[in-house]
Image (spheres, rainbow, N blue to C red):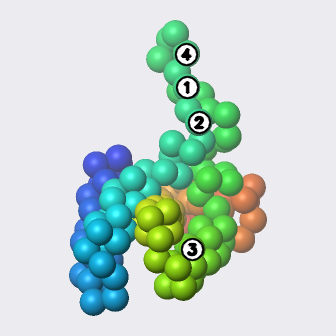
């Protein structure tokens, strides 16, 4: 199972790779913002569920775990759209959004390989992996 430190490490590695690939196309401040967006988005599908804890330490969330926030098709479309917008208009917010979306997509791809699975085409139907981690 992917843990929070694993997601943060993957976000940092993705940010370093994105910085390396975009260094010749963007200004240094834009590359730094893409990297920062990758760090911020590395666990975003989990915190976008708006979790809260009861007095007894039980975790609850406004959005059920691994439903719409882990919907792979939505993250693929959103990431592609944001990166296209970034290439046309490399502003402050598009740089952060590009890193955020790419790292969120990586989070969902990492969670896809867990036994619980993630929704791929429909936000309420999970694709479960057979024999995952055996």
Question: Which residue position is annotated with label 1?
Answer: 52
The image position of residue 5, as x and y in percent, is 28, 49
Residue count near mark 2 (Cα–Cα under 10 Å), binned few <14, some 14–19, many ≥20 = few
Estimate how packed mark 3 is, as few (under 14), some (14 to 19) or many (20 or more) residues with alpha carbons within 10 Å: many
Q: Which mark is residue 50?
A: 2
Nearest the camera: 78 or 9?
A: 78
Please provide percent x and percent y for residue 13. 26, 68
Along the line of sight, the residue nearer the viewer: 41 or 64 = 41
Residue 70 visible to an observer of this rendering: yes
The residue pinned by badge 3 equals: 82
Which element is circle 3 on? helix
At a point 27% along the width and 89% down the height, the residue shown is 24
Residue at image location 43% in from the left, 51% down from the top: 43
Q: Are marks 1 and 2 in contact (CB under 8 Å)?
A: yes
Q: Secondary structure at mark 4?
A: loop
Look at the picture and state if 38 lies above or below 24. Answer: above
Does label 3 or label 4 sit earlier along the sequence?
Answer: 4
Residue at x 62%, y 53% (from the top left corner): 69
Q: How far is mark 1 from mark 2, CA to CA?
A: 7 Å
Residue designated by label 4: 54
Q: Residue 129: give x, y in percent of width and height.
A: 54, 66
Image coordinates of residue 73 in percent, x first then y, are 66, 72
Find the distance from the CA under tag 1 to the CA under tag 4: 7 Å
The quarter of the picture where residue 96 lies is: bottom left
Q: Which mark is residue 78?
A: none
Of labels 3 and 2, earlier in sequence is 2
Q: CA distance from mark 3 to mark 2?
A: 23 Å
């Amino acid at each position: 199972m992917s843990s929070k430190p694993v997601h943060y490490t993957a976000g940092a590695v993705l940010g370093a790779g994105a910085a390396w690939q975009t260094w010749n196309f963007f200004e240094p401040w834009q590359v730094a913002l893409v990297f920062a967006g990758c760090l911020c988005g590395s666990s975003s599908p989990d915190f976008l569920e708006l979790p809260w804890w009861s007095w007894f330490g039980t975790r609850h969330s406004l959005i059920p775990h691994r439903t719409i926030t882990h919907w792979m098709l939505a993250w693929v479309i959103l990431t592609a759209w944001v990166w296209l917008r970034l290439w046309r208009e490399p502003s402050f917010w598009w740089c952060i959004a590009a890193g955020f979306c790419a790292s969120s997509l990586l989070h969902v791809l990492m969670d896809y390989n867990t036994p619980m699975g993630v929704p791929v085409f429909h936000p309420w139907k999970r694709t479960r992996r057979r024999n995952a981690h055996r």
